[in-house]
Amino acid sequence: MSNIWCAGGIATSNLLRICKSTDEGVNWTTVKSFASPYYSASRFGMVTLNDDAIVIVAAAASSGGVARSILRSIDGGVNFTVVFDYSANSVVNIVKSPVSNYLFAAFNRTTQQFLKSIDEGANWTMVTVGAVPAEDVSFISDTVGFLLTTLAIWKTTDGGDTWTSKKTGLTDMKGIFALDANNIWAVSGDPTEGVWRSTDGGENWTEYAHGGAYGLHSVFAYDATHVWAAGGQASLVYVIYSTDGGQTWITQSVADAGGAQADNYGHLIFLNNVVGFLAGRRLFKTTDGGQTWIEKGTPPFYYVQFANWFNLEFAVQWRAFNITGAEPTDRTTEGIAISASNSLNFGSVGGGSNSAVKCLIFRAVGLGVYTTISDMRAWLQSKDLVGTNFYYMDITNTWTQNKILDQVAAGTPGTCPQSLPGAANLTKIGGGDITGVGHADTSQYVYVCQAIGGDEVGGVDIDMNYRVQADKA
């Protein structure tokens, strides 16, 4: 799996340390220790861009616990360079754009300010937004994002150059999460405040009572209906969750054997609607949507920030095989690798004929913390064909020797969409789940072919591109 990074200071010394785990937080390795003047801060941000190469952390430049400097490493945390330093204010969070390596930071002390980097953290631009301290920031693209202050919610559509106030009159706001262009969530540390949600891009907001006498510090939504928030009071840590878009909430306590303050639990993420992680003084995992939480490990720091969580990448390998022979013994090295830019060529055919059946083996090679790949979706797109043609794909978990077009057409899913659609909710098509780590466990056999219509021009070289998506759990 990918590395989990964290930063902070141990209870006996708040000097800044960077650590990482490769086993879901069970064991930790200290990557870097900082002497004066860099210390851990009670609130700061951290981000990694490609797991081992670029690490960026905001740290205190004095022992006062305020994250005034941004440190950058491009060698996996071995060496750090100060890329931003501002003694008057503090960095409370750093986030990455979902579509690029642009970085955004919420910056506060006496005024709310915003920081932006378009070169992977090497240089930063500051924008003063207002007179109230900022608390959090969340972006859905390189241009559209939201900045949370203690009393208001602001929105930008130009990458942070200008901001518009979208909600005022709030109290002690702590966390914001923008799911998409429409759905945005925000929470307050004031026990009398509820959870705020907008379904129209921040234009209008609805408050939902969560039913607990405690404040909230972070919020995360997996989709429009599943949302979680974490917080608590004193040493009592709680996670609340909703499966109906915030209409009703369920409260679950999280047992921290160390009795850490609830406001140390400021990081919450879900990989799907059941598997999630809560990070603070300790790391907890749920596999049932938040009903129960199991402690995974204890990072060696008093204050903990997790960087982009797991930087998960679902890596795949494609190989094309001749199906007239036996099943390949080594599914990772035999055959010819193909990709979207190196299309699968079915050769020259005449009108009214059938293309050859090709078999591709789809193998997950980097599941990260995921345990299952399921419900594969596949699309085909041919090049240089103008007539009426039919596409077929059969995704199975069993090798089939000498498979013919009729067998593929009669399989699952049969006729395939001819291009990758924009809509994300098409009916899923595919074979069995991918579980485990062995070749046989992580492979799916994808048989593809075409029936060329009688109105097709003869002698055409058929190039077929593919796209595949899958659910992860």
Image (cartoon, rainbow, N blue to C red):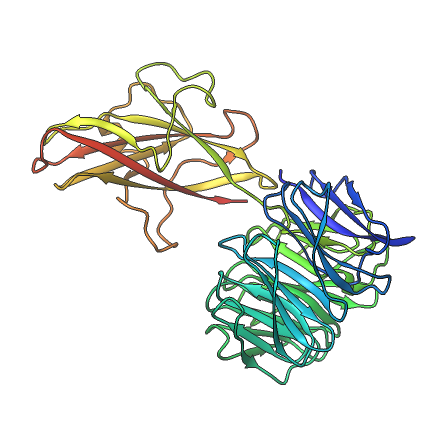
Q: Is residue 26 visible?
A: yes
Q: Position of residue 447 (x, y in %)?
A: 32, 29
- Locate residue 100 relative to residue 188 in the image: left or right: left
Q: Position of residue 353 (x, y in %)?
A: 13, 28
Residue at image location 30% in from the left, 37% down from the top = 465
Instruction: Say which quadrant the C terminus sits in.
Output: top right
Work out which residue is located at the far bottom of the displayed protein and give it. Answer: 169
Work out which residue is located at the far right of the displayed protein and give it. Answer: 12
Q: Is residue 175 visible?
A: no
- Locate residue 75 relative to residue 181 in the image: left or right: right
Residue at image location 34% in from the left, 33% down from the top = 342
Instruction: Tell me how many marks there are.
Output: 0
Q: Which sits in the foreground, 381 or 284? A: 381
Q: Position of residue 351 (x, y in %)?
A: 9, 31
Residue at image location 72% in from the left, 73% down from the top = 189
- Locate residue 428 relative to residue 72 in the image: left or right: left
Q: Which sits in the foreground, 242 or 162? A: 162
Q: Which sits in the foreground, 312 or 453? A: 312
Where 236 sits versus 396, above or below? Answer: below
Instruction: Say which quadrant the N terminus sits in.
Output: top right
Work out which residue is located at the far left of the displayed protein and give it. Answer: 455
